[in-house]
Image (cartoon, rainbow, N blue to C red):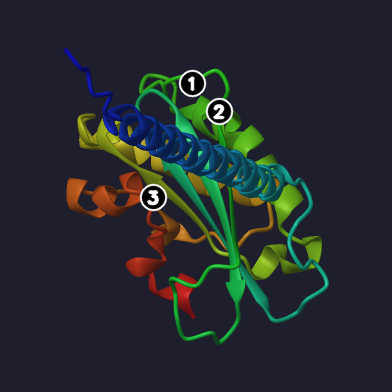
Amino acid sequence: MTFTRQHLGCPRILNTNLRQIIVISLLAAAVSLLYFSVVIIRNKYGRLSKDKKFQRYLARVTDVEATDTNNPNVNYGIVVDCGSSGSRIFVYCWPRHNGNPHDLLDIRQMRDKNRKPVFATSPEKVSDYISPLLNFAAEHVPRAKHKETPLYILCTAGMRILPESQQKAILEDLLTDIPVHFDFLFSDSHAEVISGKQEAPQQAGQPCVEWRGPLSS
C-alpha cells in the first residue's frame, strides 16, 4: 500500500489571516488611543480656558475700583432693591449717548450681609439700615459725579403688604435722611413701592433702565 503525502494550505492561510487580524487590532488600538488622548487634551484645555474666563469674570466683579473714573463720557446710576428679608444695591455705569440702554459698561452689586428685614414699626431706622449699601455705591462712583448720579430706592413685596401709612413713613425717612449724608441725585419720585410687574425684570437680573427714563439718557 502506497501513501501519498499532500501539502495542506490551511495552516498558512490561517497564519496569514491571524497576522492580518493582529495588525488590524494593533492599528485599531493605536487609533483609539490617539482619539482618547485628543479628547482628554481637548477637555483639559477646555476646562483651563473656562477657568481662565471665570477667573477674569471674578476679577472684574470683585474689583473695588470704579470703572473709568476719569472718563467724563461715562454715566452712573444706582438702584437699591429693598426686600422683606434683605436689600441689594446695584451700581450701573455705561457710555454716554450710546443709544443702547442694554449695553452697560459695568454693573456692581452688594447685598446686606446680615439680611435684616426692614422694620415697619421703626421707620426712622430704615435710612441707617441701607447706609452701608449707599457707602458701597459712593466708593464705586467718582466723587465728581455724585451729584449727577441718580439714586432709586425701590421697595418690593415686603413693603406692598404694609399699610399705606407705614409705607409713607418709611419713604419719608429715606427722602429726609439720605440727602443729608449723600450727594446723589435723589428726588421724591426716586423712592417708591413698585408693583409685582415692575419687580419681575429686576428679579431676572435686568437693569431698571428699561423702565426708568433718566437712567437711559
State the residue at coordinates (32%, 30%): 14
Mark 3 is surrounded, within 10 Å at the Cα level, by few (under 14), some (14 to 19) or many (20 or more) other residues, namely few
**CA distance for labels 2 and 1:** 5 Å
Q: Who is closer to the viewer here, 56 or 71?
A: 56
Which label belongs to residue 112? 2
**Badge nearest the viewer, 1 or 3:** 3
Q: Which residue is mark 3?
A: 205
Q: Earlier in the sequence, mark 2 or mark 3?
A: 2
State the residue at coordinates (63%, 59%): 184
Q: Who is closer to the viewer here, 104 or 149?
A: 104
**CA distance for labels 2 and 3:** 17 Å
Secondary structure under badge 3?
loop
The correct choice, above or below, for 126 with respect to 93 in the image is above
x and y, in percent, of residue 8 in the image = 28, 29
- Residue 23 is left or right of residue 66, and the answer is left
The answer to whether any part of residue 7 appears in the image is yes
Label 2 close to label 1 by CB (< 8 Å): yes
- Residue 47 is left or right of residue 183, and the answer is left
Q: Who is closer to the viewer here, 156 or 169?
A: 156
Which label belongs to residue 95? none
Q: Residue furthest front?
A: 1
